[in-house]
């Protein structure tokens, strides 16, 4: 083997949790002396960090893997790793399907990458999918951004939604300690990061598994407590969080978001369906009336807050009338953004085995109709930004216009304006909004906000 450093590439599919896992694995590889390379076909070690929420993401992984397996026949010292949710779900079956693989590892094992690779380099094929206690984040992630960063607060999920594969592949809920989370945020503040997104598959469950309860049976520590605990970390100007679950969402959390100046005015609360019978079949544990009450309370206490959500159409047995209840909810609430998907049966989930599956044509038609309504309502919601002055945290260049920089408002609206990235990256800029679109804004810079550093 040549003495030049081995090169690695990580391709990430799926959610923010996967992106955070990939950054941690990249940090471990950097630490091991590997060098990042943009082209997966030029790498000596390739990691596919996979997602199994929908079938098309899974199929894409197999086609990428096929290409790399062929490469490995000509380059036997190529190391092939499949991480993430498909790895957890398929385990040894994946190794049998693609015998060229060296390592199959579930998401709980991300922090163990070095040990697992040592085993591979000793000549073994390794499958690591057994449930383990999450090892604390002692790794230094190789973060994709120098401005914003993910911080995991809870891993796994104890919910059992009938369509969702996450609990099978990410394991049971495991909260990190408040001290560990704060220490990671303090380090990010020292490194110059301005914004942190606290991540959990079900962030409202944070703290349920930490030791100790009060006499009335209430958990001693919860996510709202955590926000108060980390809010004053020096250097961090903005705090976001995702993803909330309507079943556990509290008014106390809304009040904390209103009262804590660094917490951004944006809530991401999936509703999945606007019909109670469908919600029951999904095992979501709330009604559409309860969901509406949550939104009403947010709008009462924080009228300008942005609200985004997730919705699924074409769930098994969903009638046209039930789908129209979803349309009605979307029309009534007027989301700033909505991630939509047609139902996709996933292995190991109850709903995948039901006989009342809908045709792809019906699912596709409903998705199109929902997306049209989402665009119309988001465009209406965007109007409130016209002429306003918004604080934008500059992250990058506009990929379509290199004379413009882009960043997000506190309410998570993507905003473009003319400026020099070298000077403005990581700065909070006051921007007067001159143009509004359904999901983004354009404006003119007024001034760079003076950052107060503690």
Image (tube, rainbow, N blue to C red):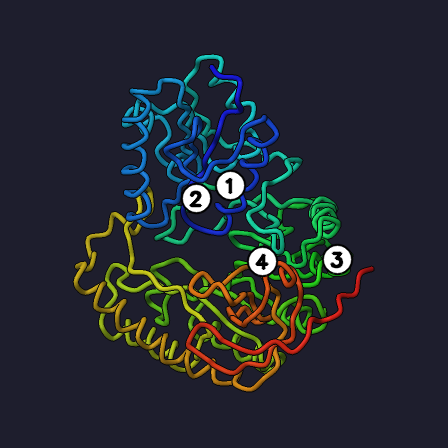
Instruction: Please tell me which residue is depicted at 59% across the width and 26% down the height of the picture.
Output: 32
Residue designated by label 1: 22
Give the CA separation, mark 4 to mark 2. 25 Å
Along the polypeptide, which appears first: circle 3 or circle 4? 4
Instruction: Please tell me which residue is depicted at 65% across the width and 51% down the height of the picture.
Output: 207
Q: Report the front residue among 306 and 158.
A: 306
Give the CA separation, mark 1 to mark 4. 24 Å
Instruction: Please tell me which residue is depicted at 75% across the width and 49% down the height of the picture.
Output: 190
Please name which of the two marks, 1 or 4, marks the residue nearer to the observer: 1
Residue designated by label 2: 12
Dot 1 alpha-carbon crowd within 10 angstroms: few under 14, some 14 to 19, many 20 or more? many
Name which quarter of the figure residue 341 lies in. Answer: bottom left
Q: Are marks 3 and 2 in contact (CB under 8 Å)?
A: no
SS for callout 4: helix
Give the CA separation, mark 3 to mark 2. 29 Å
Give the CA separation, mark 3 to mark 4. 25 Å
Please state the horizontal and vertical placement of residue 329, each as a whole percent of the image.
39, 77
Residue designated by label 3: 235
SS for callout 1: helix
Instruction: Please tell me which residue is depicted at 34% across the width and 33% down the height of the picture.
Output: 90
Name which quarter of the figure residue 425 lies in. Answer: bottom right
Please state the horizontal and vertical placement of residue 440, each as a whole percent of the image.
46, 73
Residue designated by label 4: 204
Along the polypeptide, which appears first: circle 3 or circle 1? 1
């Amino acid at each position: 083997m040549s003495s030049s450093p081995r090169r690695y590439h990580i391709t990430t599919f799926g959610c923010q949790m996967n992106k955070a896992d990939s950054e941690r694995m990249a940090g471990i590889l950097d630490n091991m002396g590997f060098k990042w390379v943009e082209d997966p076909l030029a790498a000596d070690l390739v990691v596919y960090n996979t997602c199994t929420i929908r079938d098309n993401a899974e199929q894409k992984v197999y086609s990428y893997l096929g290409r790399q397996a062929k490469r490995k026949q000509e380059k036997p010292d190529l190391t092939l790793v499949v991480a993430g949710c498909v790895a957890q779900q398929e385990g040894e079956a994946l190794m049998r399907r693609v015998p060229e693989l060296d390592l199959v590892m579930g998401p709980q094992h991300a922090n163990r990458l070095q040990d697992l690779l040592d085993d591979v380099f000793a000549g073994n094929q390794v499958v690591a999918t057994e449930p383990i206690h999450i090892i604390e984040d002692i790794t230094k992630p190789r973060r994709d951004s120098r401005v914003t960063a993910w911080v995991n607060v809870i891993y796994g999920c104890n919910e059992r939604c009938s369509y969702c594969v996450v609990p099978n592949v990410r394991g049971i809920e495991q909260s990190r300690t408040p001290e560990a989370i704060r220490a990671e945020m303090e380090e990010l503040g020292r490194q110059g990061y301005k914004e942190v997104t606290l991540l959990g598959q079900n962030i409202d469950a944070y703290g349920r598994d930490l030791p100790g309860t009060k006499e009335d049976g209430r958990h001693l520590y919860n996510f709202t407590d955590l926000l108060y605990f980390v809010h004053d970390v020096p250097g961090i100007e903005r705090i976001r969080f995702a993803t909330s679950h309507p079943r556990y969402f509290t008014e106390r959390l809304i009040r904390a978001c209103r009262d804590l100046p660094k917490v951004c005015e944006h809530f991401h609360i999936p509703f999945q369906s606007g019909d109670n019978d469908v919600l029951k079949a999904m095992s979501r544990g709330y009604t559409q009336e309860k969901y509406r009450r949550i939104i009403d309370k947010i709008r009462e206490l924080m009228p300008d807050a942005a609200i985004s959500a997730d919705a699924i159409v074409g769930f098994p047995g969903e009638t046209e009338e039930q789908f129209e209840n979803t349309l009605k909810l979307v029309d009534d609430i007027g989301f700033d953004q909505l991630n939509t998907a047609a139902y996709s049966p996933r292995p190991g989930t109850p709903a995948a085995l039901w006989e009342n599956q809908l045709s792809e044509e019906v699912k596709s038609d409903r998705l199109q109709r929902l997306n049209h309504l989402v665009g119309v309502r988001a465009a209406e919601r965007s109007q409130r930004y016209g002429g306003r002055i918004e604080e934008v945290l500059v992250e990058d260049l506009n990929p379509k216009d290199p004379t413009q920089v882009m960043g997000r408002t506190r309410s998570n609206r993507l905003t473009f304006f003319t400026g020099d990235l070298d000077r403005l990256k990581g700065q909070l800029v006051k921007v007067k909004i001159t143009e509004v679109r359904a999901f983004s804004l354009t404006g003119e810079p007024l001034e760079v906000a003076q950052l107060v550093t503690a």
